[in-house]
Image (cartoon, rainbow, N blue to C red):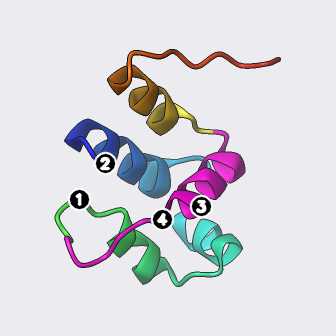
Amino acid sequence: MSEKIEKAIQELVINGPIPVEELARKLGKSPKTLIREVNPEDKKAKLGAETLVEIMKLTGGVEPLKLMAEELDFTVESSD
């Protein structure tokens, strides 16, 4: 995964609209585990695709998805 995407995910979790403690609780994780999973420097902890989708659903933040689509030469549009 590109550094740009990793940073966007980390930003969404740490500085997003839901406090990291509450987000972690909703994901069934400890805040420490969640922060490790989104830390690009921690190569031993990995964030699963299902968790990422749930993070985007809970926060409403889709920047990571948009960046992934860009890397594949696609665009993301809302169905609203």
Residue on which the image places disc 1: 40
User: Whole-percent x and y of residue 13?
Assistant: 48, 56
Task: State if disc 2 and disc 4 touch (CB < 8 Å).
Answer: no
Pick the front one: 20 or 26: 26
Task: State if disc 2 and disc 1 touch (CB < 8 Å).
Answer: yes
Residue on which the image places disc 3: 50
Identify the element where label 4 is drawn. Answer: loop
Q: Nearer the viewer, mark 3 or mark 2?
A: 3
Task: State if disc 2 and disc 3 touch (CB < 8 Å).
Answer: no
Q: Which residues are magenta?
A: 43-60
Residue on which the image places disc 2: 6
Q: Amino acid at mark 2?
A: Glu
- Give the residue at x 70% y 52%: 58
Q: Amino acid at mark 1?
A: Pro
User: Whole-percent x and y of residue 34?
Assistant: 45, 73
- Mark 3: give few (<14), some (14-19) or many (20+) Cα within 10 Å: few
Cα separation, mark 3 vs mark 2, equals 15 Å
Cα separation, mark 3 vs mark 4, equals 5 Å
User: Whole-percent x and y of residue 68?
Assistant: 41, 33
- Give the residue at x 52% y 57%: 49
Q: Is residue 66 magenta?
A: no
Marks 4 and 2, the one that precedes in the sequence: 2
Residue on which the image places disc 4: 48
Cα separation, mark 1 vs mark 4, equals 13 Å
Residue placed farthest to the front in the image? 72
Q: Nearer the viewer, mark 1 or mark 4?
A: 4
Identify the element where label 3 is drawn. Answer: helix
